[in-house]
Amino acid sequence: MKKCVHIFFIILLVLGFACNTNQSTPKDVKSLSQKTPPNVIFIMTDDHAYQAISAYSSKLIQTPHIDRLAKEGMRFDRAFVTNSICAPSRAVILTGKFSHLNSVRDNIQRFDSTQQTLPKLMQATGYETAMIGKWHLKSEPTGFDYWKVLPDQGHYYNPDFLTPKGKIQEKGYVTDIITNEAIDWIRSKRDTSRPFMLMYQHKAPHREWWPATEHLKDLQSQKYPEPATLFDDYQGRGKAAKEAEMRINEHMGLSNDNKIQPEIADKKGIKNFLVWYDRIFKNDYARLDEAQKKQWDAVYGPINEDFDKNTPQGKDLLRWKFQRYMQDYLACIRSVDENIGRLLKYLDESGLAENTVVVYTSDQGFYLGEHGWFDKRFMYEESFRTPLLVRWPGKIKAGSVCTELVQNLDIPETLLDIVGAKIPQDMQGKSFKPLLLESNESWRDVIYYHYYEYPGIHAVKRHYGIRSKTHKLIHFYYDVDEWELYDLEKDPQEMKNVYEDAAYKDIREKLLLQLKEAQAQYQDSDSLSMAILENDLKNK
Ligand code: SGN
Ligand code: CA
C-alpha cells in the first residue's frame, strides 16, 4: 500500500515537472532557477528564549526582522533540544547524534573534529561552506571552506576572532561584526559557482548581556511584566529544582550581571555569588575604548547611583534584578534583530533570497524569570524548548505553523534532505522536510533528552526523560534518584509533579515504556549513564 502511494506521488511529481517545463512564460526562468540546489543560511543565537521573539510572544519585545522568517515561512511551536546547553547543542547540530555518541556531553569536553559532520557532508555534495561567529567546541572547525570564530564564549566589545591564520581583534560590537563578516563572505569571499551553506552564529544574547552602545538606553525606562512563577518556592517538585543555583535572587551577580560596581554591592553586603564577579566586570569594561566607556558610564552611572541611594530589599531586590536582567538581555536582542534584518535585506537586494533556505534557532531556550530563574539546562519547558523558524521561498507556505515534536537533532538531516543529499544511516534525527512541505506523513510520539553537566556550574542535576505532546517524564540521578511527571495540558508551568499520583498510573506506565524504547532507539541506557558518570568524576 505504502509503495503504491509512493508511486502515485512520483507520477504526480513527474507530471508537475512536465507541466512546468511546457510553459514558456517568464515564470519559467524562476522555476528553473529554483531547481538549482538552494543555498542554506543557518542562523543560531545563544540563549535566545522563544519568549523574547514576537513571532512567539510580544509580551517582552518586538523582533520584526526575525518575525519575517515566521511570516514568510514556518514557525515551529514544539521545537526542542536534546541537551540544553551550548557546546552539546552545537555538537548535536553538527553530527545529528545525541551527546553520548558525538563526543560532547558538556561544555568542558572537546569536539572530535575528525568525525562525520553536516558541513563535511555538504561539501561532499558540492556546497561551499562557512562558519562565522560563536563556535565554542574547543577543537578547530573542520569541514568549512571559510571560518572565522570567537574563541570560547567570545566578548561583546572589540572581540577577538580565531581564523586559520591566527587570532585577530576586531573593533566594534560583536553582533554587528559577525553580520558584517557574514554578508562580506556571501558577497565577495565565496566561490559563486557553487551553492553555499553558511552557519552564522551569534554570541548574543548570552550572559552577561552587554548591549551595544546605541541600545544601552533603549530599554531602561520600560517595565517588564513579571512571569507568574517569578516567586516560585519549588514545592511540588523534587530536589533538583530546589537545589539548582540559577535563581535570579541569589545566583545572578549584582556586578557581573546587573552592572552594579563591586564596591557598591560589597558595601551593601549583597552577595555577588561568583567569586570572580569583579574580574569579569573589569575585564569586559576594560575592553571598551574611551568613547564607549563614556557612553557606558552615562547610562550605568545613574543606575548605580540610584541603586546606592534606594537599595531594594527582599522581594523588591528580586523584582529590581529581574527588570535589570530584562533591560540588558532584551537590548542585546535588539541588535540581533536589527542584524538579521540587515542580512535578510542583503539577500533581497542581491537576488539570493528566492533560492536560499533560512533557518533561525537558538542553541537552547532560557529562563526569563520563570521559576525565579535565569540560565537553562533543565528539561523543563522554557529551557528544553527552543525557537525554530524556517523560510524556504516557493516551498514553505508563508505563515504556517507546525506543532509536531522536532529537535535540534533533526536539523542536519533536514538540511541534507533539502539539498538532495543522502542522509547517513548513523545519524539519529529525522528530516522534517515533509513537515515543511506540510505533507501528511505520520510523525513521532515522543522526544528524548539527556543532560550531564553535574556537578558543575548552576548545579542542575543529571537527568534524562521523554516528552510527548501532552506529558513529560524526567529521571534525576547520581546524588538523587527522583522521578517527575508533568501533565502539560493541565499544568503547563510544570508546578506539580504527579509521578506518584494514582490517577496517573496508566500514563506513567506508558511513558516508562516509551522511555525505554527511546533509550533503545538512541542507543542510550542506564548502564551507559553510570559508565559516563564514573568517567566524568574520574576526570574532574
Ligand atoms: C558561563 C555563564 C553561565 C552559563 C555558562 C554556559 N556564566 O559560564 O551562566 O551557564 O556560561 O553557557 S558567566 O558568568 O560566565 O556568564 S553556554 O550557553 O555556553 O552553555
Ligand atoms: Ca547557550
Image (cartoon, rainbow, N blue to C red):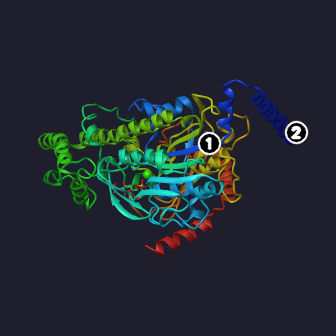
Instruction: Report the label total.
Output: 2
Report the front residue among 258 and 311.
Answer: 258
Q: Where is residue 118 in the image (x, y as percent from the top left)?
A: 60, 55
Q: Quadrant of the N terminus?
A: top right
Report which quarter residue 95 is drawn in: bottom right
Give left or right: position of 208 versus 55.
Answer: left
Which amino acid type is marked by label 2? Cys
Work out whether 202 lies above or below 136: above
Q: Where is residue 355 in the image (x, y as percent from the top left)?
A: 60, 37
Q: Is mark 1 within 8 Å of ligand 2?
A: no
Residue at the image point whose x is 42% and y is 29% from the top? 58
Work out whether 423 lies above or below 532: above
Residue at the image point whose x is 62% and y is 43% from the top? 468
Which amino acid type is marked by label 1? Pro
Q: Where is residue 161 in the image (x, y as percent from the top left)?
A: 37, 58
> Circle 2 sits in a helix, a strand or a loop, which is it?
helix
Q: Position of residue 44 (x, y in %)?
A: 48, 47
Q: Distance between the residues labelled 2 and 1?
A: 30 Å
Report the front residue among 236 and 462.
Answer: 462
Residue at the image point whose x is 48% and y is 39% from the top? 493
Q: Name the residue under label 2.
A: 4
> Circle 1 sits in a helix, a strand or a loop, which is it?
loop
Report the front residue among 63 and 172.
Answer: 172
Give left or right: position of 86 versus 195.
Answer: left
Of tags 2 and 1, which is closer to the observer?
1
For the residue carrying disc 1, how many other residues have a C-alpha within 10 Å: few (<14), some (14-19), or many (20+)?
Answer: many
Q: Which numbered tag is attached to residue 38? A: 1
